[in-house]
Image (spheres, rainbow, N blue to C red):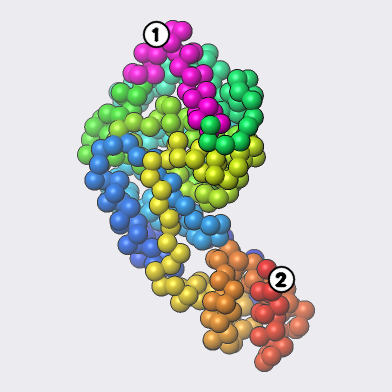
Amino acid sequence: MNMKLLVPKKVIADSDTFSSGKDLLDRENFATDLTDVLTSTSEGLVVGLDAKWGEGKTTFAKLWRNKLKADETKCIYFDAFENDYMSDAFYALTSLIHEIVKKEENRHLFNQLKENLTSLSKVVLKAGLKSGAKVLTENIAVKAGATFVEELDNATTKYIDERFESSESDKKVVENFKVFLSSLHEKLETDKPIVFIIDELDRCRPNYAMEILETIKHFLSVPNISWILVMNRVQLEQSVSHLYGLDKESCHSYLQKFVQLWVTLPQSTGGIANKVTYFRHCLNDMGLTHHYEDDSLEIHLINHYDLSLREIEQVLTNFAILENRFIGGKGFVGNTFPLYLAIIRV
């Protein structure tokens, strides 16, 4: 079998479910609980789904999207990192609403949305709304601490309000759009909130990530619409720090302005056993099964070094390279030593 040096990228098809063999970390119960939270209220929630890099956030997010759709919940998944080449976060997010309506093939509703979005886009373009970074550089000096966080948030809101208050008609356009958006679920003939999953937010350019947050807060946070922001919270806080020069505590407080509910993605309900299952799954996908025969060593090493899923993938890449160098010998040199070296290197 041809040996691969990289773990093949996992492809989650629209038909894949938590029971289709892709949920190696047994997170279906967590998905069910999270679904219950969203569907039990008509309030528009902005939820921060937090997990470290390499803990399977994207796999979970896509499988959960499929579960929501199977439960007849309108849901759109959006990879923010893949789209951060776009200079306009407002356009990117409103395109998602456009997409969910277009799928319904309701011409009258589509025209209503188009009319509302066209009017709102003109207002936003005329106002020149950008992220808090623009407000920061134009209106307030950089300084650390909780006071700055309040000033930044207030300055952003004031910047937007001033431009709308200068024109009563512009303000009315924004209000009309929010009314339309909050009643969209009824127009789509569902009693469940519409869910938008925004993935990889922490990997975006800092200013683009902040523009996404501010667009949701000021225009798209309405009843019956839920936004799930999938991220590594620590990394996103570093983006805030990079953009505004804030300390860790202030970055934490700043994100609280945008997210109403924080939840942590469980590492694995099966603990170390599921990580070992993932290790063996990747081993097989890379064609390394015949190069590794120890059934217990990985349990001790994965547990001892508390490897994340991403780190397991990196370990196997190094292991594959070492196996090529050692000509695939068996025993101590062929199995244990290359694996140990691969883990130490990662």
Residue 199 location (% of width, % of height): 49, 46
Which residue is disc 1 drawn over? 169
Left or right of 336 on screen, residue 119:
left
Tell me the kind of residue under disc 1. Ser
Q: Residue at x 47, y 48 (%)?
A: 230
**Quadrant of the drawing holding the N terminus:** bottom right
Q: Residue at x 46, y 64 (%)?
A: 267
Would you identify the image quadrant in which residue 76 lies? top left
Residue lying at the far right of the rendered structure: 325
- Whether residue 166 can be seen here: yes
Disc nearer the start of the sequence (2/1): 1
Q: Secondary structure at mark 2?
A: helix
* 207 vs 334: above or below: above
Residue lying at the far bottom of the rendered structure: 331
Q: Which mark is residue 345?
A: 2
Circle 1 Cα neighbour tier, 10 Å, few/some/many (<14 / 14–19 / ≥20): few
- The magenta segment is 148-176
